[in-house]
Amino acid sequence: MAASNMKPVRCAIYTRKSTEHGLELEFNSLDAQREACEAYIKSQASQGWRVLPQPYDDPAFSGGNLDRPALKQLLADIEAGLIDVIVVYKIDRLTRSLADFAKLVETFDRKSISFVAVTQQFNTTSSMGRLTLNVLLSFAQFERELASERVRDKVAASRRKGKWTGGTVPLGYEAKEKKLVINLKEAETVRTIFRQYIALKSFSRLVQNLDQRGIVTKRRDTKVPKFRGGIPFTYGPLAHLLKNRVYLGEVHHDGKWYPAEHKSILDQKSFDQVQTLLAENRVTTQTRRSTSGALLTGKILDDRGNRMSPSFTVKNGIRYRFYISRALMRGRKTQAGSVARIPAQAIENLVITAIREHLALDVQTPDDQLRHLVVDSVADVVVHPKKIMIRLQSDNAQTIEIPWQASVKNGPALAPSSNYADQPDPKLLQAIVRAHAWLRDLKLGKFDSVEAIATSVKLHPKVVRQELRYAFLAPSITEAILTGDQPPTITLARIPKTLPLAWSGQCRTLGF
């Protein structure tokens, strides 16, 4: 009578095997573990123990972590209150990590679950059982780490002898019988990539060239679609390919390269030439980024969501700053926004003016203070063909819209919008005022040369010389600029660097 009223104890059997070896057998390690666990549960039948029909088997899964499908299902059933006792063949079948075991025991205790290893017969409901289990798990973790060290040592020794020990097979090779073998078609693709980089000397032009040729990354037969390759090259994979010494017949281990068993695809001269070009381009890029001083770095985007990075170009000794879409920088012109390149000073001035007007600041507010306000208050700036959207860093995500017009003929450039047709051009005004101030300082002897002015304002002397021309504009041209009545031909970008001295000649040159 007592036995019939006894509450059944629901027992879940968990089994695990670290490798696939032997799983194809009719009676494998998982079957042996389950049979031993079932026999133990039957011996406890007088206590009401019953085997749950649900199998919890993890074939070919490491015990070093908890990322196992059957274990996750077991923990989910525990949370659902479907299990009373967990039975395993040995403790290390559940986990080999002491830290993971502590997490599991915490879960078991919270749900009042007992844990039993049939060959070690411990119960986690007692303090002595926990102590013994922790000691055993410490040895299990030590054994796992020792095995890992042995594998690492074996890999290191193999690599030093030039053997391929596995990993991602690079474009140009196939893995056969644990060796790298040249794939003739892919090898020619690799040589083409190196030849084109030597010829073009530019990542962006190389990406465009590869796209036109239909050259893509290595195609792989994997279960996960995103790792199958066969996609257009981007900067990261392309840079890795161009630096890979595997193509010279070498293997890498622990920061060093060793002569390998597999054959080379490239000759040393071509490889060294590419490395020299990569080093030169890297220095140039780092210099441009470090000296840009761009106000909107990390904040400006094109209208397709691509970040726009600061860059500059130098022409006739003058440095011109601009922002360029990263899609364009990566050779993905079709993925760039409507405006892929924009002058930096122009867009920064527009944003600064918009913030000053939005915050109702005095026109005499120092530039440094305004720049700090832009950095602190602007979340992002999105450039559209006919407007610029400034989103502020505020709780209500307020947005400021600035009308403008992208120039089609001369590329993306700021031009006055229809709303500002009769307003003076602030850039032209600033240039004229500064030119007259420099000319006055030279006349009064405050500076004895253009070089001295350039040093005081931290500009190149050539820039100062070119801007001084605005002090010698014809009075009619200067008056039109001051009132905003100048024709569209008179802009800072359209005024030639060298103007005739005669005022009549200036008017003819500028179409005024």
Image (cartoon, grey):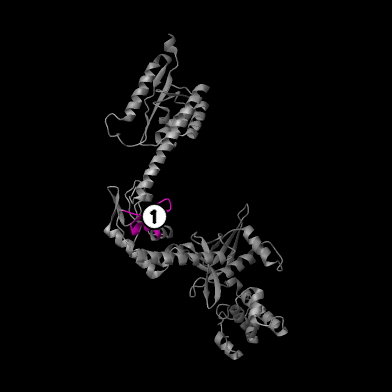
Q: Nearer the viewer, residue 256 or 494?
A: 256
Q: Which residue is mark 1?
A: 257
* Left or right of residue 3, residue 292 in this image: right
Q: How far across and down, in percent of the image, does residue 393 sit? A: 61, 55
Residue at image position (66%, 62%) is: 358
Is residue 487 something one can see in this rendering? yes
Q: Is residue 247 magenta?
A: yes
- Residue 193: quadrant of the picture: bottom left
Q: Which secondary structure lies at badge 1?
A: strand
State left or right for residue 265 relative to residue 49: left
Q: Which residues are magenta?
A: 243-260
Residue at coordinates 37% horizontally, 35% vertically from top-left?
18
Residue 183 versus residue 332: which sits nearer the camera? 183
Give the camera-side residue of 166 and 255. 255
With respect to residue 194, does 261 lie above or below? above
* Image side of residue 312 versus residue 191, left or right: right
Q: Is residue 310 visible?
A: no
Q: Position of residue 328 (x, y in %)?
A: 46, 65
Q: Quadrant of the N terminus?
A: top left
Q: Looking at the picture, how far across and down is residue 170, in whole percent?
A: 35, 54
Relative height, residue 183 to residue 5 (above, below): below
